[in-house]
Structure formats: C-alpha cells, structure tokens
Amino acid sequence: MFEMIGLLFSLFFLFGLSIVLGLLCGVAAWLLFLGRHRPKALIATAALIPPLSAVYLVLTAIVLAIFVPNQPDEFFGDFAEPLPNGYLLKGLGKMPDYAYFDTSNPSKLQPRTLGSVLRLEQDGPMVFGAYGHLNRDFGKLMTGDQGYFAFDTRTGQVQNFDTLQKLNALAGHTVHMVESQYFRSQEPERIFLRRTENLIFFGPPSAATLLCFILLVRFRLRGSTSVRNRSRR
C-alpha cells in the first residue's frame, strides 16, 4: 500500500515537473520572437516536449521491465544484478538490507551465507561483502555490519570473517563496498545493456529537444535576415 502511494507521488511529481518545464520552454520560445512573427506550431512543440518526454520515460521503463531479464524495477526499486558464473544479487526496494544471493543456473545451489547482504564489492569472480541481518536474528532491528564474507562465484563457496581487516587480508587490498541497492554488475553484457538502455531512455527526448532548439534558432535568424533585407529596400 505504502509502495503504491510512494509510486503515485513520484509519478505525480514527475509529470508536474514536466508540465512546469514545458510551460517555461513555451514562454522562452514565445519571448524569443517578441515583436516578430511567431511560429505557433513550433512554440507549442517546444512546450510539449517535456511532458511527452515524461510519458516516454514511463512507458519505456514499463516495456524494459517486462521484456528484459533481471531488469531493475524503476518503479519500486527492486533489483537483480547479475554476478559472475550465473549468480545474482537480488533484493526488494523497500528492504534493500535484506538482499541475498541467488542463482539463474538450475544446476547450482544457492550460496550458504550467514545472513543478508548489506554491502558488497565485486573483484573479478570474487564478491566481498558485509552481512546485514544474520539468519538467526532476522526480524530484529540491526544497524551496521554484522560480519563479513568472501564469495567465490567459481566454486559457490563462502568464507566468513569477523573483522574487516581479515577480509582485506584475503582480498589483498582494501575492500570498498557499496550498499546492495546501489551495486551495479560489472559483467560486460550488463554494462553494455545499461549503456544501451540509457541511450533508449534519454536519446529520443534529447534529440527532440535539440532539434526543436535548432529549428527555433533557425526560424529566429531567418526572420531577422528577412527584416534586414526589407529595411534595405
């Protein structure tokens, strides 16, 4: 229920902001032709680009969520980031500190961890991390790290440590971990997918905005040239 309220509020804010930006773009385009012939259709297009872009972003997010496997949920914040050798980091947007490892390979078993994955770092096939809620303490309010682990995705084995220093010693470097909901897979296919999705998300709105701006400036300059030519005559 609260997730739906939050989603509706976010959508309301997105579309409200897009309408305000559209009005500002329309007013700016109108003032650009102050005292001159105004291309009303082009000015209206400039005002409509932000709201239409917001609609495009929402529809694109829905399509990608439906058709792309392990796609992060742009609406509720759920995530499923691929790890090496067929493993996944999964979690719910409303409870990211309860993230866990899973597998997309039926022949592999789910890693045996002591609790939820609070923070982690990927280093090649190795995943270093910190526990959040321990299995025996699930449901209790806990803050901070509750131990550490090294997960070898090649073997599926998990080593546990009681201090960060021991984890750093195994890793051979100082481990820099990010919270689970902010982790992004370093798999080449996933990196390529993220770049492609960003292009799909922001490419058309950016191209439409740039094209409209160029047409407005061109129309303005052409109008100025026509005025100068008439004054010379």
Image: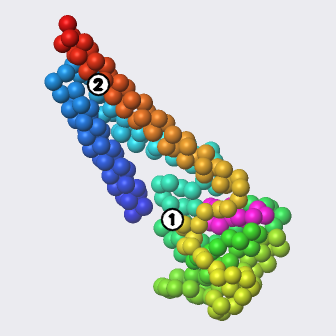
The vertical placement of 40 against 200, above or below, is: above
Left or right: where does residue 146 sit relative to residue 39? Answer: right
Q: Which residue shows up at 26% across the image and 21% down it?
A: 224
Left or right: where does residue 199 sit relative to residue 211? Answer: right
Query: Which portion, as a residue range, is magenta?
Result: 80-90
Crowding at dot 2, Cα within 10 Å, few <14 / some 14-19 / many 20+, comes out as some
Left or right: where does residue 6 sit relative to residue 125? Answer: left
User: Could you say which is closer to the camera, residue 85 or residue 115?
Assistant: 85
Q: Which residue shows up at 55% across the image and 41% down it?
A: 200
Task: From the top left corner, tell me how far across and down residue 201 is, in percent.
Answer: 51, 44
The vertical placement of 116 against 232, above or below, is: below
Extreme residue in the top direction: 233
- The amino acid type, in three-letter code, at marker 2 is Arg
Secondary structure found at label 1: loop
Q: Which residue shows up at 60% across the image and 51% down it?
A: 194
User: Could you say which is closer to the camera, residue 216 or residue 91?
Assistant: 216
Residue underneath mark 2: 220
2 vs 1, front mark: 2
Q: Which residue shows up at 61% across the image and 45% down it?
A: 196
Left or right: where does residue 104 sit relative to residue 57? Answer: right
When asked about the image quadrant of residue 145, the answer is bottom right
